[in-house]
Image: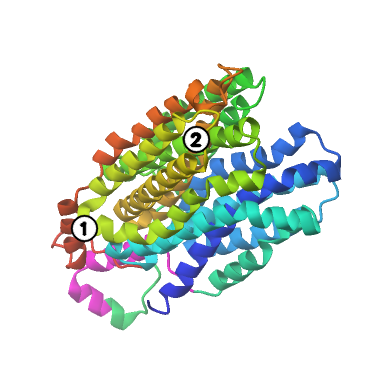
Amino acid sequence: MTARRAPVLACSVVGAAVVALDGTVLTVAQPALQRDLHAGIDQVQWTSTGYLVAVASLLVFAGRLGDRYGHRRVFAIGALGFAAASTGIALAPGIGAVIALRVLQGVCGALLQPATLGMLRTAFPPDRLGTPIAVRTAAIGLAAAAGPLVGGALVSAYGWRAVFLLGVPPTLAIGLLALVTAERTAERTVERTAERTARPAGERTVRRAAHPPATPRPSGSGLAALDPVGALLLAVALGLLVHGLVGAARPGGATAGVLAVAGATVAGAALARHERRAVRPLLPPELLRSVPVVAGLAVLLAASAALFGTLFVATYFLQDVQGLDPLDCALRVLPLAVLMVLGAPLCPPLQRRFGPRRTATAGAALLTLGVLLLARLDATAGTVPVGAAAALLGAGFVVLMVTATSVVVHRAPEVHAGVAGGLQQTAMNIGPALGVAVATLLLALVPRGGFVPAEGAALPALAMISALALPAALALPGADADRRRTRRGATSPPSGRRACVRS
């Protein structure tokens, strides 16, 4: 690995892991936070909801900022802001300040997350993206597994405030590292190359001798190039959607959730109308018309919804039906995290050998099989069947996550790497909210037996959602198509096509 790529990989991996760790440790800290600040349960829930709404609504726009102004610069701002917000939460005097700072932390997380993929896309050749994405995924799995254990230990020894200080040193370090590392944006590089190749050679020679080269400006200027109207409509649509899904998962929140989702639908329709007319739309048409990109996003959405909805049901089953404490519950599903960490490095060679289509199809089958196995458990289920189902969930999900993310980032034009990363992160944020909402609504249909998988309707429905990843996986590129694309990318572009220089 070159000296230029090592800092990029470090920032991407640590940034993604810190965000994953923050989400898992907060769940453990919320009861202590509620007692210490004398807050209501609805207020404590907003420490999670406010963060999720802020993140989901701004991810794509943050990716667009990275495409235009540089992924490392946007990443640095997000990481340093995340560290500052975390410090503020640890010092917050009341629940109102915690909620406000969590929203600010969500804004900074939105700046940070798409850049973790955008930086990889601009630093690594397309045919070598699989390995860094696998390392990033393994780090996320490890952080998610360690979160409850680390969070429980910190809360028990030092209180809930220590949980928020946990991520300050690493985010501060990677923010400063990204800030001092130079980067040229992909958009400026492509346009500079296009302008240089469009001029006759004689003219280029004369101009080079007469004047020093001027830095070309990207097409469009100011806010117009960022499509602020599209960004606002997308933020409203995604914010209402996440808020509606989270609200529907709460007792008595179904009506408000349906209204929020209806509002999201209206905002989405207005967004589609605006994007068709925009000169420089927030969502580039060439990205949305890419079948591999759209299929990869569909895989991630279905897989994350199925996994997190299933874990939601399994947690209630293990704790409320079988009477396990949180630590024993975490140990029962530990094979999921182990398979994610150990399986991630194996995904790139599998993808090179069999292609994204076959690899993702196998992952979707494993994930669906794991959900179906859990759906057969009764109240007397032991450690082995629960652990086997968790292992299948972990193996299937890690294959899907690494493969689909690689396709989305690889197939997106480099100039739109940030937007592609934002869409990937959006799918990974909306999917869990959707899965938990579906599980909550279906658990309520069987009041006395819903928490027992074999007697409820939640896990069969989640298995159907998981199965939706199968047709999406079949739309991914095959091995031959991926090899042909890699060979074309390794050679010089044909005459008449615009050359692209990696930033």
Q: Is residue 195 magenta?
A: yes
Mark 2, secondary structure of its residue: helix
* Residues drawn in magenta: 182-206
10 Å crowding of disc 1: few (<14), some (14-19), many (20+): few
Q: Mark 1 highlights which residue?
A: 353
10 Å crowding of disc 2: few (<14), some (14-19), many (20+): many
Residue 208's disc is none
Rendering quarter of residue 342: bottom left
Taking the image as shown, residue 126 lies to the left or right of residue 45, namely: left
Residue 124 can be seen in this image = yes
Q: Give whichever of 145, 175 is nearer the camera.
A: 145
Q: Position of residue 19 (x, y in %)?
A: 58, 54
Q: Give whichever of 217, 459 is nearer the camera.
A: 459
Question: Does residue 394 sit above or below 249 in this rendering?
Answer: below
Rendering quarter of residue 370: top left
State whether the magenta stretch is mostly helix, strand or loop.
helix
Between marks 2 and 1 in the image, the one whose residue lies nearer the viewer: 2
Mark 1, secondary structure of its residue: helix
* Amino acid type assigned to the residue bearing label 2 in the image: Thr
Question: Does residue 3 sit above or below 155 in this rendering?
Answer: below
Q: Position of residue 17 (x, y in %)?
A: 54, 58
* Amino acid type assigned to the residue bearing label 1 in the image: Arg
Residue 310's disc is 2
Total numbered circles: 2
Quarter of the image with the N terminus is bottom left
Q: Position of residue 300 (x, y in %)?
A: 40, 42
